[in-house]
Image (cartoon, grey):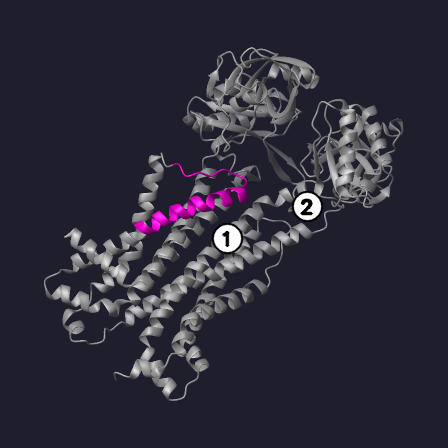
Amino acid sequence: MFKLNFKIALRNLWKNKGFTFINLGGLAIGLASCMILLLYVAYEWSYDKQFTDVDKTYVVYQNDSANGKIYSWAWTPNVMARDAESNVPGVKYASHSTYPDSRLFSFGDKKLQSRAVFADNSFVKILDYKFIRGNKEQALKGVNTIILTASFAKKIFGNEDPINKTLKLENQDLLKVEAVIEDIPANSSIMFEALMPWGLFEKRESWARNPNWGSNMCLTLVQLNDNKLFPEANRFMNGIYKRNDNGNTAEALLHPLTKWHLYSDFENGKSVGGKIEQLKIFLLLAFCILLIACVNFMNLSTARSERRSKEVGIRKAIGSTRKSLIGQFLLESVFITFISTVLALVLVEVSLPYFNNLLKIDLQVDYNSITFWLTLLSLMLFTGFAAGSYPALYLSSFEPIKVLKGLKIKSDSSVSIRKVLVVFQFVFAACLIVCTTVIYQQLRYVQNKPIGYDRSNLIQIAVKGKMAESSKLELLKTQLLKSGAASDVTFFSKSITEDGNNTTDISWEGKTRGESILFNNRGIGSDFIKTIGTELVGGREFSAIAQNDSNSVMLNEAAVKMMRLKNPVGATIYWGDMKFTNVGVVKDFVVESAYQKVSPMIFYPSYRDGTAVVITRLNPNQNISTSLEKIDALVKQIEPDYPVSRKFVDESFELKFRNEKLLGTLSNWFGGFAVFISCLGLLGLALFMAEQRKKEISIRKVLGASTTNILTLLNRDFIKLVAIANLIAFPLAYIIINKWLAGYEYRISISALPFILAIVLSVLIAVLTVSIQSVKVAKANPVDALKYE
């Protein structure tokens, strides 16, 4: 029986090659789009889940109240891990480490910069990286030792055995390689190639040797014995600051490591989401694309019902049951889905390199994974049965006497269902057009919003090695200006496009008792205002002579407003126990999120706390390539051991919009695929409708109807459906996009433009798609259709 049904399925598919091609194309594109989106979602979902006891592992966050809000960040004191491991019930291991940072390693004449982390021994117990060589239990217990990843060991030592080889760290410390671990997976939040003992960090950084609950510079990880102990452990962590630092009102909380990547946004001290919101959108997009492909199949299958009605009648007359007919039609559907799945896999393999390049990741189909094949099988069967269920039930319901007598099938319900399905497709298409337009408008709005300084032709050069000496920095500044490569140069204690250090330890006359304000604090050099292209609102900037500003600070406008200073220039500012005078007020400029208001900022002369970057304004009268060559040469003269690391500020600033760009790009691409699949279905439906009304059209032509009249007639019904779809889509789109915009402090108002664009595009798509086939029918000779009547 199965063999017979299979032969009939093949014969029907071959007989209706046009419809088969449209169904195969629609399902293949739908399945391929769904697979790629699911691969991406699975990749993001798998972040940090490769460790054995990851379900018991937590990142420690600090909650601190300031500016009337609760701020949360995963920066904690260097003494927290030891206290948690000793005094917090349920804690098995607690570790403190630095965040990954670029370091210079040398072996002989070979010098390489690599991301490195300093950590204690508990770090490798909590995050159980696979040790290829070396003793895990003894790892990181020494001082002058180092653990390398396999790929970095090969880069620096080649094929030699790295164990017990000696590396030099930043031309200072000799380190013996004690172990080699497997490369860190790309879906890890903590990425590094070298791991060094915390003892070495304390040796290099004097502040790290002193227990200090007020210095939040570390990443603290905690692993529990059992998750049942989480409530009690978290409660004890909440009070860890109060127990150890009298007067400190901050609280610590445990945030699951498995949620660190996707749930990184906090409000009022609680996790409220993050990148997970994007994944939900992509999951919905994947489901809807697949559903649209299934709808196409349903529409085309039921549209061809009259052509298969006699087949159904004859088979029922000779004894076929409705159950067997349903099986026959479902077999056809599953068979088409199987072929479409094969084609979809080909499309996925072809598309993945472009997709990976777009997202800067490395997605691959793991054909050795049982999970992959089970998911693919489930997806194929779901699609096959979802797409074939309604056509199978509808076609198998025909009464044999009526169809064999040639009576017209009463298809009112079928037509109404087809119309509902077409409306569904265009509801989704209209929603996508509105949402992607608003995403684009929001992105452009924030990108073009004034940021308080001129980021064009501005570069920042990372300060490494000998460059950190004040005399070397001043020499570099002089040489850069003298070379003509730069028009202005200044120094900054952090990258101008990244978050900096924060403090609440600022006081002033008139401060309300108990008031806590979080200040972003940065070190800046002389000529800072002119170099970055911002404005000095009042007072002066720091002098090039260090002694002139040993007790000076500067504020931004947001700080002046928050502090309620009527005469900010000359105001006395207390930073802890130290007294300073505010000498100038800087116009607000963006250094953190471009989506949020500028934070209060306090500036100090950069020589006090070291310089991280040299900010250089390129000479507009000189070729950029020539200027960059001169800059690289001058930097290399001062510090020959380190590779020159420089970035254009405007390129670094654009990285702030990466998530929004990703959302917009993927929505555009896969939304486009969804619209294309809808067009395929509409084309097939128009093909059937034109064929079904061929005689009617011919009679109308004989009676004098023009081609335009015929096209209007055939398009009218579809335009009505598109109009209904837009009416349904607009409220849905408004709710979705308004909720998305609510996450941004600076956001656009939703205008009529996206909705007008959706109407115009959806109508245009429908008219063009239907007209492609309708023109052929409208121009056909009416004699060909009527000569046998």
Taking the image as shown, residue 378 lies to the left or right of residue 765, namely left
Is residue 560 or residue 431 the one in the foreground?
Answer: 431
Magenta run includes residue 344? yes
Q: Quadrant of the C terminus?
A: bottom left
**On screen, residue 556 above or below 632:** below
Callout 1: 10 Å neighbours few (<14), some, many (20+)? few
Residue 296, image x and y in percent?
36, 60
Name which residue lies at 34% across and 48% down: 341
Q: Earlier in the sequence, mark 2 or mark 1?
A: 2
Q: Report the mark closest to the observer, 2 or 1.
A: 1
Taking the image as shown, residue 529 lies to the left or right of residue 180, namely right
Q: Residue furthest left?
A: 318
Name which residue lies at 62% across and 23% down: 77
**On screen, residue 677 above or below 519:** below
Magenta run includes residue 754? no
Taking the image as shown, residue 516 lies to the left or right of residue 414, namely right
* Residue at mark 1: 669
Inspect the image, locate mark 2, and give the three-letter code of the amino acid beneath it: Lys
Q: Is residue 609 visible?
A: no
Question: Element type at marker 2?
Answer: loop
Name which residue lies at 78% across and 34% down: 631
State the extent of the magenta-drawn residues as a range: 338-366
* Residue at mark 2: 597
Taking the image as shown, residue 707 lies to the left or right of residue 240, namely left
Name which residue lies at 59% across and 64% down: 753
Residue 48, image x and y in percent?
48, 31
Is residue 698 or residue 230 the one in the foreground?
Answer: 698
Report the predominant secondary structure element of the magenta stretch.
helix
Quadrant in the rendering for residue 80: top right
Is residue 59 or residue 185 the one in the foreground?
Answer: 185
Inspect the image, locate mark 1, and give the three-letter code of the amino acid beneath it: Trp
Question: Element type at marker 1?
Answer: helix
